[in-house]
Amino acid sequence: MTASPRAAALRQPNDLESFWIPFTPNRAFKRAPRLIARAKDMHYFTPEGRAVLDATAGLWCTNAGHNRDPIVDAIKHQAEELDYSPAFQFAHPKSFELASRVAALAPADLNRVFFCNSGSEAVDTALKIALAYHNVRGEGSRTRLIGRERGYHGVGFGGISVGGIVANRKLFGTLLAGVDHLPSTYNREHQAFTKGEPAWGAHLADELERIVALHDASTIAAVIVEPMSGSTGVLPAPKGYLQKLRAICDRHGILLIFDEVITGFGRLGYAFAAERYGVTPDLLTFAKGITSGSVPMGGVIARDGIYEAFMRGPEHVVELFHGYTYSAHPLACAAGLATLDLYRDEKIFERAKALEPKWADAAMSLKGLPGVLDIRTVGLTVGIDLAGRPGSPGLRAYAAMERAFHDEGVMTRNTGDTIALSPPLIVSEAQIGEIFDKVGRVIRAVN
Ligand SMILES: Cc1ncc(COP(=O)(O)O)c(C=O)c1O
């Protein structure tokens, strides 16, 4: 297809036309861009040098804060030493070191780490491992995957199939076959304005028994859930819900996958949410916080038994036909090691845990503002549901995000008519106050 003269004329260096921006309304953005040129610790800076307080840790990822010197130095040093080594058939030392460090942070026998480059890849990797695991054990009839309504598992075909956000699914054909969904755990009537895990909702895990009765356990490979659904607007797991899911999966030989792409690395006050809830999944996905967002990286942690099930057959034959050119990329591994050092040395997960009550109290101070329908918190996250504008769903929270950025100097996220906040875990108490003062003003202004 030839480009139109207008499109060709527009393609100048630094014009805004060529870049098709992901998950963004491109035309609105290009009319009033929100550009970020620099960052340090808790702040972004626009090209003009205006500071913007980061209340979202970028996209839930810069848990250690921005441009931290040890991470920057580690990346620089690694780029000088080794830019790339093949991810298949060869390996570099830092990949083993990082895998051991990640395994040490994970609970129980979650000891085997498969690296990839994003949360979406981590999810597709976990789903493939689950299917292959049953196959290599002679239970190849277990092909069904169970997700959950309102779940977000990235944008690969596997992830959108088990995911439960309709806008991410409806334009993309038939998706994976043989997928079913648990109901969402959210119910405003029973849960509104809860700090932490809601008391109501554990019984929703029993829906898995209904799904098993419908399809038979012998056809089901795995269940995948986020311990806290982030991208759909912060939905904490009800008390006892994850424990119930674990028990039902055990009863029927179904693998349980926790998608910890957001909840990993301190967001809920622990290395992984699995520890907070005392529930060990069979596979656990991570990304984002592993490098504090500095270099793309994701991965899957598998229990020993899963890894061992593959370690049969002739030793020269590949055991799992899966991987990415950039799995365990040297820059990502170097950044990951420096990030884990920072988390340990600055006790960042413990800090997040200690701040949780103050964060939750500050968040709840917005209760009663015009149009605020619900506020949910867990760890250092909050979802604030706003009443939508009639006929224009999502517009109010979008207007809030724009106003927060341009007028208040604070970065917020909007999903539907929910404002979602998740600051870097180095946020100070004063900055928590600043965030909610600013967001409160914004909510009043967009009413
Ligand atoms: C739970 C969960 N899984 C997967 C993903 C996808 O991650 P990525 O955007 O790195 O592919 C996300 C992203 O927010 C997520 O929240």
Image: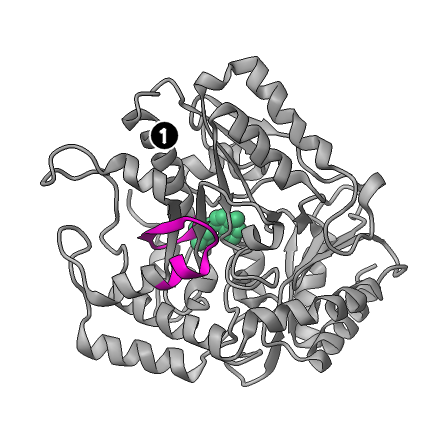
> Would you place residue 234 above or below residue 177 in this image?
below
Q: Point out the residue furthest to the left here.
A: 316
- Judging by the rendered image, the residue that carries numbered circle 1 is 131
Residue 323, how many percent across, how many down? Answer: 25, 46
**Where does the magenta region start and end?**
101-119
Residue 201, how many percent across, how many down? Answer: 74, 37
Q: Residues within 10 Å of mark 1 (few under 14, many from 20)?
A: many
- Mark 1 Cβ inside 8 Å of ligand 1: no
Q: Amino acid at mark 1?
A: Leu
Residue 114, how many percent across, how many down? Answer: 32, 50
- Residue 106 among magenta residues: yes
- Residue 65 among magenta residues: no
Colouring scheme applied when the structure was drawn: one colour
Q: State the SS at label 1.
A: helix
Residue 339, how many percent across, how many down? Answer: 42, 72
Question: Is 326 situated left or right of 217 in this image?
Answer: left
> Would you place residue 256 above or below residue 39 in this image?
above
In the rendered image, the quadrant that contains the C terminus is bottom right
Residue that appears at 75% across and 67% down: 357
> Would you place residue 439 above or below residue 4 in this image?
below
In the rendered image, the quadrant that contains the N terminus is top left
